[in-house]
Image (cartoon, grey):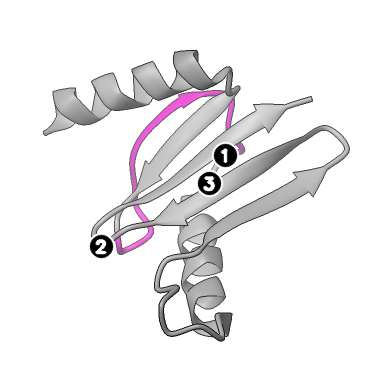
């Protein structure tokens, strides 16, 4: 699985023009990271996406996509059943 995840992260990083990508498990532990990402952000990303799912008013939206924007870029975070992925884009 490690090689498959590494390849998927590599492809996503280069196709999307992102500056970084990180994959986190359901314990908040980093499974893999590529490019430029903030250090030790894996637990915070998992927490953020878990809290956002609780805030959703729609029962059909179980795993929302979160977009955080700042002056120097943005980050998109998505949780699936076993994996949370964040894609960082620099402006």
In this rendering, is residue 68 above or below 35?
below
Residue with the mark numbered 1:
39
Which is in the foreground here, disc 2 or disc 3?
A: 2
Identify the disc placed on residue 40: 3
Q: Position of residue 82 (x, y in %)?
A: 24, 58
Does the residue at mark 1 contact the one at mark 3 (Cβ under 8 Å)?
A: yes
Residue nearer the viewer, 6 or 42 = 6
- Secondary structure beneath dot 2 equals loop
Between residue 74 and residue 47, name the one nearer to us: 74
Res 52 label? none
Q: Point out residue 84 in the picture as x, y percentages from the top left corner.
A: 38, 53
Whole-Å distance between the Cαs marked 1 and 3?
4 Å
For the residue labelled by badge 1, is the local secondary structure a helix, a strand or a loop?
loop
For residue 81, the mark is 2
- Rendered image quadrant of residue 26: bottom left
- Magenta segment: 26-38
Residue occupying image coordinates x 11% and y 34%? 1
* Quadrant of the image containing the C terminus: top right
Task: Give the distance between the C-alpha atoms of the residues marked 2 and 3, in whole angstroms.
Answer: 22 Å
Answer few, some or many: residues within 10 Å of disc 3's Cα (few below 14, many 20 plus, some between 14 and 19).
few
Name the spot of residue 69 as percent of width and height, x first: 77, 46
Q: Residues within 10 Å of mark 1 (few under 14, many from 20)?
A: few
């Amino acid at each position: 699985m490690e090689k498959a995840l590494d390849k998927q992260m590599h492809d996503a990083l280069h196709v999307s023009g992102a500056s970084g990508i990180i994959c986190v498990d359901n314990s908040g532990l980093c499974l893999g990271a590529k490019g430029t990402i903030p250090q030790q952000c894996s637990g915070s990303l998992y927490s953020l996406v878990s809290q956002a799912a609780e805030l959703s008013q729609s029962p059909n939206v179980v795993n929302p996509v979160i977009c955080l924007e700042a002056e120097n870029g943005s980050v998109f975070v998505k949780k699936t059943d076993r994996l949370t992925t964040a894609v960082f884009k620099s402006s």
